Image: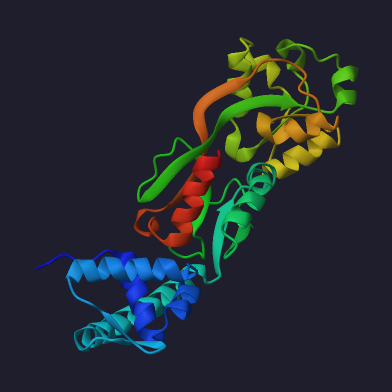
Amino acid sequence: MRPLPPLNPLLAFEAASRHLNFTKAARELNVTQGAISHQIAVLEEYFDTRLFERKWNRIELTPGALAYAEVLQHAFEDMRRATAAFHASASERTTLTIKGYPLFLSRWLTPRLSAFNRQFPHIDVRMVSVSGASLLDFEHQDIDVGIRYGRGRWKGLTSHLLLTDELVPVCTPELATRHKLRVARDLAGKTLLQTHARSSDWPDWFACAGIDDAVALRQVKSFEDLSLVHRLALEGAGIAIMQRVYAEEDVRQGRLVIPCDTVLTRELGYHLVNPVNNSREPKIRAFSEWLLACG
């Protein structure tokens, strides 16, 4: 079977065959009349036959070209309809539901979403908070993707690491001054704030600093959610331990300080997860690829 002619000459011929006017065909395709004439000449050379005949001040298709033009017109019309339908379905507004930890959503994800909205204006992002003790239930809850803390190995889930543990202590400047907090040992025995779900954070941090946690952890207070721990730290109720990125804005604004240099880094972290069987859904794929690219 002979290969198809080049696409541009076919486009020019199909438009000219409908209008029977090179100027109108050129206007439709946003090119010059000379470009249409050139493309028709290329196609005539390809077939080694004339496609149009000039009669006075108008043009007509040759008998042989007439049947070919009718087939092309139907084919291009089918392509136009298919293109319009695909564009409509691809640009149809849809909602992406993300479930994750409140402080992660507000401090890490939300500042990045304006860029996503600009690139994918047809995808509305809906965020749902989940407490530290709750789990993501993709089967029974209306969730597209979730944020989960751990090592990134969960059965049936696709997992991408977004943020690795980089934990620091934070407190108000007034509390740091009052207790003369300068090095890790100064925090031992003070009021320490943490969440139930992350009860190993303070022991691991003090171990990282080389300090006996039996003495250091005498006044640990645990709460359900890290957002509450963060709020209590802002109110001067104690020293919280959290991801350094969560505290960056408060530190810049002078609401919190990082009183010592010890940073706990671990392989644990926050992962973007979704069921393996929905990974290729367009909105999920678009969001996942975008988020991993922007970091």
- Res 68 → quadrant: bottom left
- Residue 243 in view of the camera: no
Instruction: Give how far across and how far down residue 204 sits, in percent.
Output: 58, 22
Quadrant position of the C terminus in the picture: top right
Is residue 70 positioned above or below 165 on the image? Answer: below
- In this picture, residue 226 sits left or right of residue 74: right
Which is more toward the observer, 203 or 121?
Answer: 121
Instruction: Give how far across and how far down residue 16 sits, in percent.
Output: 38, 80
Which is more toward the observer, 16 or 183?
Answer: 16
Is residue 187 positioned above or below 47 on the image? Answer: above
Quadrant position of the N terminus in the picture: bottom left
Is residue 86 positioned above or below 190 on the image? Answer: below
Q: Residue furthest left?
A: 1
Instruction: Give how far across and how far down residue 232 sits, in percent.
Output: 80, 38
At x 43%, y 63%, the residue is 139
At x 85%, y 14%, the residue is 180
Which is more toward the observer, 94 or 254?
Answer: 94
For the image shown, how many numbered marks are present on the structure? 0
- In this picture, residue 22 sits left or right of residue 205: left
At x 48%, y 55%, the residue is 286
Instruction: Give how far across and how far down residue 4 sits, in percent.
Output: 20, 67
- Residue 161 in view of the camera: yes
Q: Which of the colour schemes (rainbow, by chain, secondary structure, one colour) is used?
A: rainbow
Q: Residue furthest front?
A: 56
Which is more toward the observer, 60 or 167?
Answer: 60
At x 25%, y 84%, the residue is 71
